[in-house]
Structure formats: structure tokens, C-alpha cells
Amino acid sequence: MKQESNYFDPNILAHINGLLLRARLVVDGLLLGIHKSRAKGLSTDFEEYREYSPGDDVRHLDWKSYAKFDRYFIKEYRRTTNLKTQILLDVSGSMDYSSAKLSKFDYGCLLAACLSHLMLRQQDAVGLVTFSEKVVNVVPARARQGHLMAILEALEGSRPQGKSAAGPVLQQLAAGLAGRGLVVLISDLLDESEEVLKGIKHLRYRGNDVIVFHLLDRDELDFPFSEVTRFEDLEEDLKLLTDPREIRKTYLQAITSLIDTYRGGCGANSVDYVLLNTSTPLDRGLVSYLSWRDKGIFNP
Amino acid sequence: MGISFISPFFLLGLAGIAIPILIHRLSQKRARVIKFPAVRLLLASQKQLAKPLRLKHLLLLALRILIVASLSFMLARPVLVSWPGFTLAGESRLALGLIIDNSASMRYIQTLSDRATQAKEAALAILNSLEQVGRVLVIPTVAAPASAPRAQLLAPEEAIRELKALTVGFGSGDLIHAFSQAYQGLRPWKGQKEIVIVTDLTKGEWERFNLAQVTAFDSQLPVNLVRLGGEKRDDNTAVLSAQLVDAPVVGVASSVQVVLVNYGQRPVKGLAVKLLLDGRNTDQKTVDLEPFERVKTILEFRADRSGWVRAEVNITQDKLAVDDSYYLTLKLTEKLRALVVDGDPKTSLKGSETYYLVNALNPKGTAEDSVVVPRVITPDELTQLDLAPYPLMALANLEKLTTAQAERLFNQVKAGASLFIFLGDKVVAERYNAALYDGPVHILPQRLRAVYQGAQGKPERIGEIDFDHPALSIFNGASAGLTSARFYRYFLLDRSERRPGSRTLLASRRGDPLLVQGQVGRGKVFLFTSSADADWNDLSLKTGYLPLIQSLLRYGAGLQTTKQETSTWVGQPFEFSRPGVMGSRIATVTDPAGQEATVMVNSEEGKTSGRYSATFSPGLYNLSLDGVQWLKAVNVPREESDLAKVTKEELANKLAGTPVSVVNYRTAEDLAALIGTRKELWPALLIFMIILLVGEAIVANRL
């Protein structure tokens, strides 16, 4: 059983405490927050002037315009709202691979916990969906500070197992998610790339801001094996006895091609694609991404 | 063509092929197992590979097996052999009777090494070609000292060891014995068998060879003859013999007669002949020899001490050095002191009774060059003079002898001295008979009777000469100097009675004894029935007088050359004997190399004798028995000196009825006809292995 403290490395928290994760698109929310809402209303963000029409609240009359034009104008402000974020965490068997201390699953949990903490700290609602070939667990999005514990419990209760079928699950979730919000997908995406992109597209179609955190282990990226090895798949009954030196080049081409496919597909759908090597400390990868998202500088 | 292996046990290394196979199997079974997320991607990658991994593994396995196999083959040193001859013929194992000619002629130096070394090289090449399959009898024609009767079938390695230990003899080989050993040794062998003989085919030993005398002869056995030195006669000069002309006496010039021979077809000019005494060059000459000519030459020496002297005659060394030296031993004696008692001294030297006798004893008149140093005394002096230093005594025309004088003479002669008694006009037969025959002193061999005087103008002449006597044998065929002498007067001897051991050496035509030898103890008495001077005969004026007197005194003093030690041939035993019974039963023999051996001696019938048979090398053997020293010369028999060769036809006749092949050996390649050609394959295998290693490294991505 992982301890709660395991999810919050003080280094990571120190780095992300000053950051915000803003929705890039307008989102629907119930409460006031930092994100742009579709509704106009109470806010400090000036939207537009419009002529007064009967029924308008006279408190919004702009008296300076009346003095200048001798006509009544209503000064309108864009309402800001809080964000509803769904973190989709892949808990399929393939996430259980680790070449170092942290497996992809551990890394994903850590990432999910950090993001939840971040979102809740900025008053956003955050929920967690874990999935493998189907949805395993759902923690609905809430903005309460105490909700973090619910998410952490869900994370702790998760075990990486089963096959992965991110594409169908994403499509299923896209259909089920209400309102526009932020969807954070944390997965190794070792799946049919077309299906996964289709799911992402579906989420986007429903107006969600989507961020894809593509987690890959260093071994998957570098393939450093040299001895004759029997590779056994973590999800399926696939085995391969081979000399890794033989197939390294071809494999690296294949994995690069997969990454490029996801990167291209996400870019085409205005989805942030973040490739994270699990051997890279999380604070470095996450902070770089958040800084970029906030300021347009991303240097993982 | 076929392949054989020099070190076949390395072929066991082929079992090492199992190692790459095992590694291959184990690497498949014990491959590291990794649970990996992207196996699907790996599978896709694998499918894209043009060269399937399994094929690569099989290729690697094949390469590694080939590397191990080629390494193993390379270490086993395979040899590509073609065998028109006997090597590995057929499937059956071969037994080889290998006869090595190690007679003295094999010491002939051809180019850089001697023929014996070349014979060993050829034999080694033959033995090496047998590999492990054959069995070999190694038979030297001159048996080695320690292993004379040995002839066992040996494995090639043992045979090679035996061959390497084989020494070259100094004597002549016994081919009949060697062939008999080969046939006998091979008889029990059931498989294929052949005889190989490596020889120079010199006539010396091959002329004596007769196949009919070979025991256990099998006409089916092929005889392979490896001939060294070709068919042409090799030039050689040799010292055939060397012997003393006279018994050597200290301080007197003596000579050695040397017989040299040129067995070559070219004349030899300026051949140096040296005489070495105790290692010191004493005399030297140069001699010219025409082809096949024998030349006698004389080398002189003058020794300055008595006793045994080591002598060696040698000539300029040629390619066969073993017969260029001839050893002989000399036993030098001190000069003989002769006491001449003149019974009729005169004031004139020439008129004295002993003038001719003294001249005959000391012909040159000087003390230096004379073997005998005569001293002339009067009868009176005979009473007082110590006779011990005089091994020779002569009484010339003594009127009488006192009893004391007679006894002293008798004792001296008994002890070994020689006494010459010349008669004459002063001699009274009765007194002589009384003093020297009838009394206790038995010096005269026969009693004297009256004086015979021939009719005037008809003197007697010598009619009988005992040529069998060692002192008179020199007159055999050249007795003119004696038979022409005229005897006018002489004493007749009583023929009815004579002392035991007396012998008539010279007699008149009438048969009257003129010179009679008697034996007294260890000494000799020579009774001359006529006078010593020219009063009663003119023998002293004849040419035969001097040699007669000299020969007699040498005989009397034991100075004949025939009494010098004669030479023995290498391999033959020599006997030694000495008068008297020795206390010790063991004699010590020191051979030329300085090795000592002991020999048992027998003391029988008043003499001690022994026999030594280990004369395996030429030189001088030193014998020591109870402090008495002998020297014995052992020489190489000269039958090996003539290097004429047996011709093809002669050889065919000698070995008629046997399948014979002849190979003329100069280099190892010449044996190809006999043992086939051999080519070592390891360099090719090494290159092949390097290629395999490079290939393996490439396939295994090491390069």
C-alpha cells in the first residue's frame, strides 16, 4: 500500500506550488474560478459594450459613455469560472514496467496526484478515471479540498493489470463526460494509435481541453538490451526470443514512429502532447510543461 | 593421396565441437526473460528483419563448430601424404626392418655432415612417415657395445629414440647378421612387412654379403635400399699399416715403416705423413701417391727414455678421417752393455781376437748410435768385474776359465744374460768340457771334441742354416753372405750328447755344427765352434757377419721387432701375458677415452695372462697389473678404407630372388619414391580458421 506522502515529493510540490493549470479553451463551470467561461457575468475581465435594453441591470450602466455619447451603454464582463478536470489514468498491465525505481504506473499515479493537488489548490474540480480495456474506477470531479483524499485513495487502490484498450475507453468516456472541461490522459499509449487518436478527437469534439501525458520508460525509448533475451508481453501472451542488438534499430524506428503519430495526431487536434520519460524526475517534466502552458515555454 | 596426422591425439579436441552446441542450446534455454510492455512492437520489428535471427544463430553455430574443428585439426598437424611406396600401404599395419649401416665407412663426410648423420636423417624421415601405425626393428650393421643382440619390434617413437642413440662403429658391418636379424624379427608379424636398409654400399662389407647365408630368409619380403653417396667410388687415402723396423733402443735412431695407400682415382700430391711419439711430432715426410698406389715410407725417431711410448702415424685428414691415423706402441730399452773377453789380446787392434766381433757389435764405432756398448777385457779382469750390468757377454778364444769365473758366468746366464762363446787356437777342449760341461756349471750345449781341419785349399762352408730360428730368418732367401764364408778350422762337437734345449743354427756341409744355441735358465748360450777373428774362418769378412751377430744379440737380448706389441683391430679382443705369477687377479684397462675397466687375469704355468674384449674405439689401451704397465694399440680395420661401391648389377646379383627397390638419397625429397610426399596442412587450416574467426565476429556483430 503506497503511503500518501509518496505521491507528494516535497521537491515536486515546491516546484508546482506557484503554477497554475489554466484551461486553454473556454470551459463550463459552476463556481468562480480562473478559467474563462462561456457566460458573461461577474468578473474583472471587460468583454464589450452594448446598448442598454429594458430589463438590464442599471448597475452595469457605464456612466462615462452616457456622458460622452448621451446614450445608455451597458458594460459587460466575461465571467470566469472554475474548471472541471478529469484525469484519465491508464492502469493496464503495460504500465507496470519499470527499469528504475518507478514504474510507469507509479509515475502516472504521481503525476495524477500532483495534478489533482494543483487543480484543487486553484479551486478547480478534479476527478479520476482509471482504465485498462475498460473503465476500472471513477472518482467524480469535485472542487472540495478534501476531495484530494478520495483521489489518492482511488490511486492507491489501483493495480496495473489487464489489457489496454485506450481508444474505445476514451470514446466511451467522451460520450459520458458532461460539459466542457479539461481531460488529462496519462498513459503509455501502447495501443492502436488510430483508435486512441479517434478517442482523443472525440473528447475534443465534445469541447474538452485535452492534455496527453505519454509515459514511456527509458528502456522503451532506448532499448539498451544486449544479450539474447526472451521478451514476454506484460498484457498478452506474446513471447519473443531474440538478440536485442539485432532488432534495436528497427524497434527504435517503430517507437519513434508511434510517438510521432501521437504527436502529430494531438497537434492536429489542438491537444497538448507531453512525452515523459519515467526516468526523468517528475518535477522537471511537469514543471516544464506547466510553465510552457502558462508562458508558452516548454522544455521537458 | 591420404591424410595422416602427426599428433593425432589432438583430434580428441573434436569433442570440443560439443561446446558451441551446448552453448547454443543453453543460451536458448537460459536466455534472460524480460517482461516488456512493447513486445508487439518488437514482434513487428522482428518481422521486418531481412535475416531471421534463427538463421543467424544457426550460422554462428556452424561457424563456431568449424572453428573448434579446424583448431583441433590444426593441432593434430594433418599431413597430406601420397604413397607410391610402403607408407600406410593398404589398411594393414606395416612392420619395418630398418637396417642402418653404421660401419666406419659411414664416417665419410659428404658436404657438411657425415654419411652416418645423413643415414639417420633418412631413417628418421622414414620412421616419421610411419606415424603411429607401424612397428620397427632397428638393426645396426655394427652392433652397439651394450645392445648387440637386441632386435625387437618397436613403436616408431621408441625406434626414433633408439635410432638417435645409435653410434657409428669403427669396424666393418656384418650384413649377413643384420639381414638375419631383420628376417627373424619380422617373421612373427602377420601384417605387411618390408626391409629398409640405409647404406653407402661400399664394397668392403657388401662383397662378403651372401643372401644364402642369411637365416630365416623370406623371398617375399620387399627390400628397399636407400643408397648414400651414389655409385661412384669416393677418394680416400689411408695409413694401411705402420710397424717398427728395429726394436727401439733409447738414444738410437729407430724407424717405423709406414704403408700408405691411395684408394682414389686421382693422384695425391704432397701427402704429409707424421710420426707422433707421446703426442709430439717426431718425424714428417711428404709422399706422392698415384691412383690405387701403395707406398712404403720410413719415419725415423730417436727416443730419449726407456719404457712404453705412445706412437701414432697420421696423414693429412681427408673426408674419411678414421683411417688417417695408425696407432702403435713402442717399448724402448736401454742400450745393451756387452762384455767381450779377449783371450788373445794383441798390441794391434786389428790383430786382436775380438776386432771383428766388436765392430759387429758396434758397427758405427760411436757410442751414440750403437745399440750395443761393448767393453773388451782380458780374462783376468773377468774374475773381479761385476757382471750384472752386462746382459751380453762374449768369450773369444779363452784358454781356460777358472771355476769361480765359470760359476759367475753361469749365474749371470741363468739370470737371463746371453753368452757368446767363440773358440780358437788357445782353447783346450778338455778344459772347456771340464769347466763348462761336465762340472756343476752347464754352460756348453754340447761337449767339445777335436779340432777339424779341412784339406788345404778345401775349406768347409756353411751348408745348413736354421731359417726357422728367429735370428736367422732374415737370411731366408738371402743367405749368400753366409754360405760363401770359408771355415778352415773348427771344433767338432760330440753329437751323441747334448744339453736339453740346444739347437744347431749353422752347420757345415759335412753336417758339423758351426753355431749351436743352448738354453741355461732364462739365458742363452751361443757356441761358435770356430774363431771370432779371421784366423780359422773368413766369416767375419763376409757381408752376412754383421747382420748375423746383430740378429743374434738382438735375439739374445729379446730385442726383436716381433717381440714388440702388435696392433689389434677395433672389435677384436687382445690378449696379454707376462712371465711370472702376479699377486693380483685383476688388471686395470684404461681405454683411449680414459675410461677404466677391470679384467680378470689367470696365473698358470709360470705366466700371467688375460684377455680384454671391449675394444670399441681405436687408440691406445693402457693395461696395469700389479704396477706393471702395458700399452696396446687398437686400430680401425682398413677393409672400410676402400670406398669402391657395389654396382647395380652386383647388387642385383647379391639380392637376386628378392623384390628390391633402390633410392639414391641426397635430400629428404629423394625419399618420396619410398615414403611418398608429405605436405603439412596446418598453414592452410590456420588461414581457414582466421577467416572463420573474422566471419564469426562479423556475424556476431563484434566488428
Image (cartoon, coloured by chain):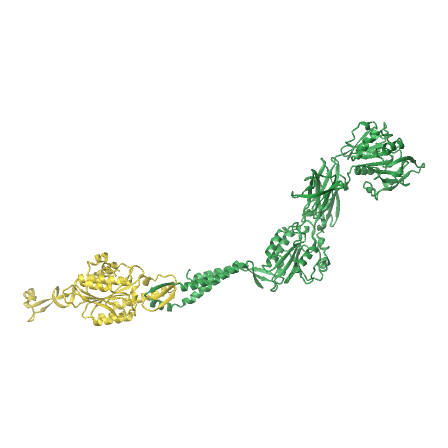
- Which of the 4 image quarters holds residue A80? bottom left
Q: Is residue B136 visible?
A: yes
Left or right of residue A91, residue A250 in this image: right
Task: List x then y, in percent, for residue B10.
Answer: 52, 59
State whether residue A206 is above or below residue B419.
Answer: below
User: Camera-side residue: B562 or A220?
Assistant: B562
Instruction: Give the colour chain B carries in the figure.
Output: green
- Which of the 4 image quarters holds residue A288? bottom left
Task: List x then y, in percent, for residue B78.
Answer: 55, 60
Instruction: Give the colour chain A carries in the figure.
Output: yellow
Task: List x then y, in percent, for residue A58.
Answer: 6, 67
- Which of the 4 image quarters holds residue B160? bottom right
Q: Quadrant of the C terminus of chain B?
A: bottom left
Left or right of residue B436, residue B42 in this image: left
User: Camera-side residue: A294 or B621?
Assistant: B621
Task: List x then y, in percent, for residue B469.
Answer: 82, 42
Left or right of residue A4, residue B82 in this image: right
